Amino acid sequence: MKPHVLIIEDETAVVTLLRYNLERDGFEVSVAMDGREALMAVDENPPDLVLLDWMLPEMSGIELCRQLRRKPVTKSMPVIMLTARGEEADKVRGLDAGADDYVTKPFSPAELVARIHALLRRSRPVLADERLTAADISMDLAAHRVHRGGEEVKLGPTEFRLLRHFLEYPGRVFSREQLLDAVWGRDVYVEPRTVDVHIRRLRKALNNPENSDVIRTVRSAGYALEPEGA
Ligand code: CA
């Protein structure tokens, strides 16, 4: 699975440079030219990481970063701010608005790619490892096995894919539609209610009286894996 980076930048020359370097490094790249486009893009197809330019038409990068942090789908998504400004005060403002890292233009593409990898290693261990873990749950992707508190958990194939998706994005809230796209695929028509059925099965398999429920139901939004809750 290629990591997906959303570039939010209005300067085509910078977009071309970023796209070239990221695609060469094995990333899937999408682009939004302004804040409004970006907010639609993250709902449509949530990226694994956002590269956000400070200087954007209409809504500034700082304001957009604040808005991304308020949205459930992007609340914990890694954000790297790009900017022509190099002042310390601006850096602080960027980080205050919720950016995880900050790169000043002109930047070295190699350094930027290294920073992207570093952030993704923290947020999506699957890209670096064959094992996913959260709280006392561990998933061995190669052996296709799941353990909770040392005990093996038997899961059906759909529950396995659901859990894998949650483990790849701990804490992030997914709507039923997003789970359908991620787990069943875009081309398959499945009723959103089907997601609830499989969530119930997944909960039943993972939880016994000694274990807390790690799957959180977010009213009118969807579901999230809450690693801290365990
Ligand atoms: Ca710009």
Image (cartoon, grey):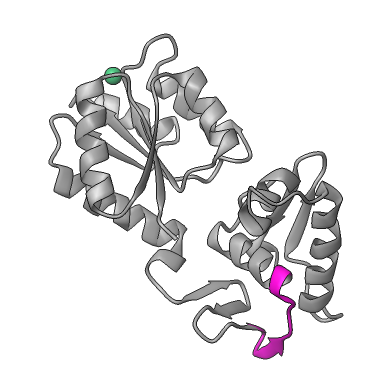
The C terminus: image quadrant: bottom right
Q: Is residue 46 left or right of residue 230?
A: left
The N terminus: image quadrant: bottom left
Q: In the picture shown, does residue 172 fall above or below 73?
A: below
Quarter of the rendered image showing ligand 1: top left
The front one of 197 and 93 is: 197
The front one of 35 and 66 is: 35
Q: In the picture shown, does residue 86 fall above or below 198?
A: above
Q: Position of residue 160 (x, y in %)?
A: 67, 72
Q: Quadrant of residue 123?
A: bottom left
Q: Is residue 101 left or right of residue 151?
A: left
Q: Is residue 146 left or right of residue 65?
A: right
Residue occupying image coordinates x 86% and y 61%: 197
Q: Is residue 154 magenta?
A: yes
Q: Position of residue 133 (x, y in %)?
A: 55, 73
Instruction: Give the extent of the magenta segment.
Output: 147-158
Residue occupying image coordinates x 87% and y 80%: 209
* Identity of the residue furthest to the top in this view: 58
Q: Is residue 151 magenta?
A: yes
Residue occupying image coordinates x 64% and y 90%: 150
